[in-house]
Image (cartoon, rainbow, N blue to C red):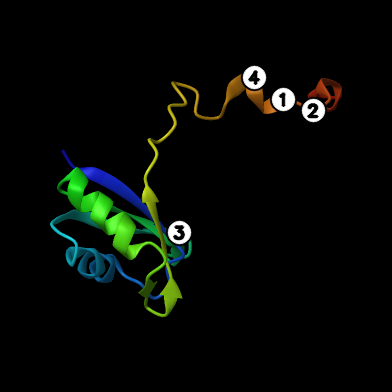
């Protein structure tokens, strides 16, 4: 089963291809993606790498965590699942948690 890894501390110059090559030393990389800002098209400084097996993923975490890629020290951790916000991604009622509800009312 494939294991997804979170990679932080990436240089803004690191590409998905460069990330793939760095992790390929540890085994088969199923996918590698540097996350880009949708407005500026600049790297956000983190990405995800999917290794083909759990053993390869563990080896990559052990060996590549605190390694240097494109002049930056990277952090490699097991990726956590994306939170499920259900059918209301804005949060609905939770948007007002901790705020004074009176300030959110319309004033005519």
Q: Earlier in the sequence, mark 4 or mark 2?
A: 4
Residues under numbered marks 3 and 1 in contact, where contact means CB atoms less than 8 Å apart: no
Query: Neighbour class for label 2 at 10 Å: few (<14), some, many (≥20)?
Result: few
Q: In this picture, is 106 found above or below 49?
A: above
Find residue 57 and report its horizontal and vertical position in percent: 24, 51
Q: Where on the picture, by quarter, is residue 54?
A: top left
Q: Secondary structure at mark 1?
A: helix
Q: Identify residue for label 1.
A: 96
Q: Secondary structure at mark 2?
A: loop
Q: Identify residue for label 2.
A: 99
Residues under numbered marks 1 and 2 in contact, where contact means CB atoms less than 8 Å apart: yes
Query: Neighbour class for label 3 at 10 Å: few (<14), some, many (≥20)?
Result: few
Disc number at residue 37? 3
Q: Identify residue for label 4.
A: 93
In three-dimensional space, the C-alpha distance between marks 4 and 3, rounded to whole angstroms, equals: 28 Å
Q: In this picture, is 75 found above or below 84?
A: below
In three-dimensional space, the C-alpha distance between marks 4 and 2, rounded to whole angstroms, equals: 11 Å
Find residue 4 and report its horizontal and vertical position in percent: 28, 46
Residue in front for this viewpoint, 43 or 90: 43
Disc number at residue 9? none
Q: Earlier in the sequence, mark 3 or mark 2?
A: 3
Residue in front for this viewpoint, 106 or 22: 22
Q: Residue pushed farthest bottom?
A: 71
In three-dimensional space, the C-alpha distance between marks 1 and 2, rounded to whole angstroms, equals: 5 Å
Which quarter of the rendering shows the C terminus?
top right
Residues under numbered marks 1 and 4 in contact, where contact means CB atoms less than 8 Å apart: yes
Q: Secondary structure at mark 3?
A: loop
Residue 82 lies left or right of residue 18; in this view the side is: right
Question: What residue is shown at x 57% (from left), y 26% (from top)?
Answer: 91
Question: What residue is shown at x 79% (from left), y 28% (from top)?
Answer: 99
Query: Neighbour class for label 4 at 10 Å: few (<14), some, many (≥20)?
Result: few
Q: Earlier in the sequence, mark 4 or mark 3?
A: 3
């Amino acid at each position: 089963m494939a294991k997804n890894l979170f990679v932080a501390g990436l240089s803004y110059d690191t590409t998905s291809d460069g990330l793939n090559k760095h992790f390929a030393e540890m085994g088969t990389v199923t996918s590698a993606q540097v996350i880009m800002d949708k407005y500026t098209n600049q790297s956000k400084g983190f990405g995800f790498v999917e290794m083909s097996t759990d053993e390869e993923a563990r080896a990559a975490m052990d060996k590549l965590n605190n390694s240097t890629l494109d002049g930056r020290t990277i952090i490699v951790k097991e990726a956590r699942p994306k939170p499920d916000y259900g059918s209301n991604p804005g949060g609905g009622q939770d948007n007002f948690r901790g705020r004074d509800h009176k300030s959110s009312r319309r004033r005519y």
